[in-house]
Amino acid sequence: MTTGFLPNSNSDAAMSVSRLANSEPRRESVKILVIGSPQGVQHTIYTLYRLGFAPVTAWSPPQPTAKPGEVASLLVRQISIAQ
């Protein structure tokens, strides 16, 4: 009867793996949009690059918006969200 109180090493390992999986950060996409004149958008992208935020090539090509003379460029980043 006392054997029912002995820990099951297999279930302990499974619980440890389960706890580890739940403590891992979740990945989420975040979108950063820069809108302005072509020069302003390019300046902002290069400034963010110099600050180490993202490579210039990670941004989408500037696309015209509904406003004349205005463009938009998008960056999508994957970030970790702690649970």
Image (cartoon, rainbow, N blue to C red):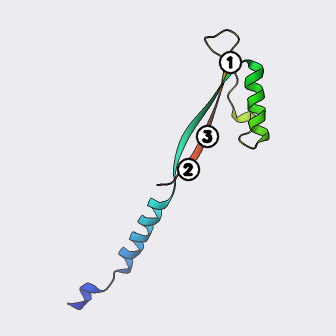
Secondary structure of the residue carrying tag 3 is: strand
Q: Residue furthest left?
A: 1
Q: Position of residue 62 (x, y in %)?
A: 70, 22
Secondary structure of the residue carrying tag 1 is: strand
> Is residue 61 rendered to the left or right of residue 2?
right
Q: Position of residue 13 (x, y in %)?
A: 42, 74
Residue 20 numbered tag: none
Which residue in the structure is indicated by mark 1?
71
Q: Position of residue 64 (x, y in %)?
A: 66, 15
Residue 77 numbered tag: 3
27 relative to 46, above or below: below
> Is residue 79 rendered to the left or right of residue 59?
left
Q: Position of residue 68 (x, y in %)?
A: 67, 8
Residue 80 numbered tag: 2
The reply to whether discs 2 and 1 touch (Cβ–Cβ < 8 Å) is no
Amino acid type shown at disc 2: Ser
Q: How would you rate the neighbour count of disc 3 (Cα within 10 Å): few for under 14, some for 14-19, many for 20 or more? A: some
Going 78% across and 21% down the picture, which residue do you hit?
A: 39
Marks 3 and 1, the one that precedes in the sequence = 1
Going 38% across and 80% down the picture, which residue do you hit?
A: 9
38 relative to 53, above or below: above
Marks 2 and 1, the one that precedes in the sequence = 1
> Is residue 43 rendered to the left or right of residue 6?
right
Q: How would you rate the neighbour count of disc 2 (Cα within 10 Å): few for under 14, some for 14-19, many for 20 or more? A: few
Q: Nearer the viewer, residue 37 or 65?
A: 37
